[in-house]
Amino acid sequence: MFPNIAAAEMSPVRMKTLLSICQSAMNSSDFGTIKNVASQLSKTSRPDDDTQGKTYDDCLVIAFGEPETKTSVSELVNKIRTTAQELETSCRELLVAAPEAAVSNPTCKDILLK
């Protein structure tokens, strides 16, 4: 007997068949079938074909919900740094345009007095 190495890789014909079944199940709101097919699809790689890829994504989202996006700490730090720089620039522009408004604004006041 040969070992079953097809667990991670699925034949294109089987993938197309499962996607077709899931599409039909989505059209008829058959959530049991959607979950069953999605559980099989989730063990494989997403198809490269755009149409099949969209069906694959839709099937998994309907079955399991939107995937949680992981927060990138470095992206957040960079976003905060950029936002702080933009805020400081805006407060300095406000100070030139309307000094009273700049110093009475609590956010700008903190930035300008640091």
Image (cartoon, rainbow, N blue to C red):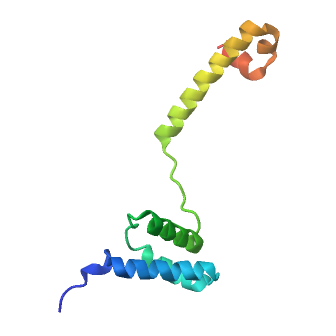
Residue 86 found in image quarter: top right
Q: Nearer the viewer, residue 44 or 101?
A: 44
> Residue 36: x and y, percent?
51, 83
Instruction: Relative to 54, say whether 41 is above or below.
Output: below
> Residue 58: x and y, percent?
55, 68
Query: In the image, 102: left or right of 88?
Result: right
Instruction: Relative to 9, say whether 54 is above or below.
Output: above
The number of numbered discs placed on residues in the rendered structure image is 0
> Residue 26: x and y, percent?
60, 78
Query: In the image, 18: left or right of 1?
Result: right
What residue is shown at x 52% (from left), y 71% (from top)? 60
Instruction: Relative to 31, say whether 65 is above or below.
Output: above
Q: Quadrant of the C terminus?
A: top right
What residue is shown at x 35% (from left), y 81% (from top)? 13
Q: Quadrant of the N terminus?
A: bottom left
Residue furthest bottom as drawn = 1
What residue is shown at x 82% (from left), y 10% (from top)? 100
**Is residue 79 among what the camera can see?**
yes
Query: In the image, 101: left or right of 29?
Result: right
**Is residue 113 among what the camera can see?**
no
Residue 7 found in image quarter: bottom left
> Residue 46: x and y, percent?
40, 66
Q: Nearer the viewer, residue 96 or 47?
A: 47
What residue is shown at x 59% (from left), y 67% (from top)? 65
Residue furthest left as drawn = 1
